[in-house]
Amino acid sequence: MPKIALIVLLCLSPCWPQVAKEANKDYQTPEGRRRVASTLDDPHRQEALKANELIARLGIKPSSVVADVGTGTGFMLPYFSEAVGSAGRVIAEDIQQDFLDKAAARIQSQHLSNVSTVLGGDKNPNLPEGQLDLVFMLDVYHHFDYPSDMLAHFSRALKAEGRLAVADYYRHRRGPQDGDMSGHIRADRDEVIREIESNGFRLESKSDNGSQQYLLIFAKK
């Protein structure tokens, strides 16, 4: 191929931006991730999340295989472990090894024998193909730099009847003490729904998860 033609071809090739640059700013250094980890384990956040209620709304059946994508320090892991039971399995995924180390310490200290960890990437979560009943994300979806790539991998990882659940922040929080998250959250709920549905999923339900968050549950198309 002539050199000029090759240059033109490279210029015309699609270049997908990292759309969550602002949201991921604090994750770029070990110091930043330590600060984030302290907020993930904050008792006020954990109280506000009402994890038992959230688990109940997900309708997880015993013996299910669940992926907690972007597990962070592993806050949700004990709840998932109990929900799937001894015959089920939980995969704790994150793209940061230091977060996974904290999640692994929680797994060990709480004797969560049905939970394992996997290191993913920003385009591929490295989940097993066709084995998952549920892919779950808590405060994670707005961090995806390459949502279409991730959604394609989720679709392949889910069983035919598998579900995708997203619990995330409204772009404009609605409580009286809540601030504007528009500089951090790249898309609001309805935009997220359209994005996920355009990548091979169908919305099954939507609801509020407290005053600041929504919960979306999707099935594969």
Image (cartoon, helix red, strand yellow):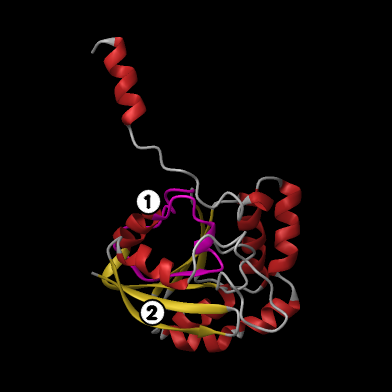
Q: In the image, which disc is placed on residue 149?
A: 1
Q: Is residue 178 left or right of residue 88?
A: right
Instruction: Check if residue 190 falls in the magenta segment.
Output: no
Give coordinates of residue 182: x percent, y percent.
59, 63
Residue receiving disc 2? 63
Magenta extent: 122-147
- Quadrant where the N terminus lies? top left
Residue 123 or 170: which is nearer the viewer? 170
Residue at the location (32% across, 30% down)?
12
* Mark 1: few/some/many CA within 10 Å (<14, 14-19, 20+): some
Q: CA distance from mark 2 to mark 1?
A: 28 Å
Q: Position of residue 204 (x, y in %)?
A: 32, 80
Q: Is residue 207 above or below residue 190?
A: below
Q: Please, what is the three-letter code of the amino acid marked with disc 2?
A: Ser
Viewer-nearest residue: 125 or 83:
125
Relative to residue 145, is residue 9 drawn left or right? left
Ranked by sequence position, the earlier of labels 2 and 1 is 2
**In the image, is residue 140 part of the stretch drawn in magenta?**
yes
Task: Report the side of 195 relative to 78 (left or right).
Answer: left
Quadrant where the C terminus is found in the figure: bottom left
Tag shown at residue 35: none
Q: Residue at x 44, y 83 (%)?
A: 58
Residue at 40 percent across and 57 percent down: it is: 127
Q: Position of residue 193 (x, y in %)?
A: 38, 70
Does residue 202 show up? Answer: yes
Give the class, few, some or many, for how many residues have Cα within 10 Å of label 2's Cα (few <14, many ≥20): some
Residue 49 picture location, percent across and down: 62, 81
Indicate whether 128 appears above or below 85: above
- Where, by quadrant of the figure, is residue 152 drawn? bottom left
Identity of the amino acid at label 1?
Answer: Asp
Q: Is residue 92 visible?
A: no
Q: Nearer the viewer, residue 156 or 178?
A: 178
